[in-house]
Image (cartoon, helix red, strand yellow):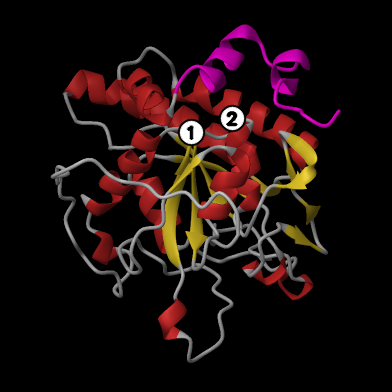
Amino acid sequence: MSNVMEAPLTCGLLNETEYQITSDYDATALLDLLKNGVLTVEQATIAFCKRAAIAHQLTNCLTEIFFSAAIERAKTLDLQYASAKSTGKPLPPLFGLPISLKDSFDVAGYDTSTGLGCYVNSPASENSALAAMLLDLGAILYCKTNLPQSIITGDSHNNIFGRTLNPRNKSLTAGGSTGGEGALLALRGSILGVGTDIGGSIRVPAVCNGIYGFRPSVGLIPHGGVRDLTPPGTDGVKSTVGPMATSLRDCELLLKSILQADTWKYDSTVISIPWLDVKPAHKLRIGVAQDD
């Protein structure tokens, strides 16, 4: 079967509630349900862990899987919700929201192999700056996603995990270098993920998989603890961290949540700029190159 987009519905592995949780909402809407107690964090986490596992079997999009740890954290956050409701304490901005990460981000206890054999079985001792920040903001981290060997090409293939396939046509590429995120988001095994980009590594997979991706300016988002394989002396082509999502407003949600926090506490090199709700003076004009 070339197009596997309907497989999560037809495979029979998700119950009706799990299918609804993973299909019917973007991250902004799901966050509202979590903060208002309509869904428990454990419910949402289990649903996305199951759908991510389905997506992986279809497209080979995951590298590191930490579902059990994510579910335990979800249970803790549900207890935090009950306590917050009784005391009136505010919930963190990304409370209970499942977020996937590109493999290049260090997560304590798990490999950041970036498709290279020399980094296999060498788990990170601590979280990358962004992973630590997302956890402090209340998010659930549950998996890392595939990329090309050395993170530098437009097809997410390496000798450790193999190639990630495009769920709309498995004969086509999922793009790169954040292709695992692209395929996972397209199949809604995640609805909000984080990638990195120098020359298209967020934007190319977004195009290939029919999702949203945004490349912020370099230095805005904490980058410490990201395995960056660009050689010395290439400061002009630095990587930047950015969101990938199933809706445009979810890209804004992630960026706004990060920039409104104290980014400098997590990465001393970050450019600390507050979120500005700037309204456009005129309609955006977009140019499309129809051929090369």
For the point 48% across and 28% down, the residue is: 75
Indicate the secondary structure of the residue bearing disc 1: loop
Name the amino acid, label 2. Answer: Arg
Q: Which of the image's four quarters has the C terminus?
A: bottom right
Percent coordinates x, y for residue 122 in the rendering: 69, 68
Percent coordinates x, y for residue 196 in the rendering: 50, 60
Task: Name the residue tied to disc 1.
Answer: 246
Residue 12 visible in the picture: no
Q: Alpha-carbon distance for marks 1 and 2? A: 8 Å
**Left/right of residue 206 with respect to residue 284 in the rendered view:** right
Task: Name the residue tied to disc 2.
Answer: 188
Q: Are marks 1 and 2 in contact (CB under 8 Å)?
A: yes
> Please, is residue 275 above or below residue 26 in the view?
below
For the point 42% across and 54% down, the residue is: 242
User: Magenta span covers which residues?
Assistant: 1-25
Indicate the secondary structure of the residue bearing disc 2: loop
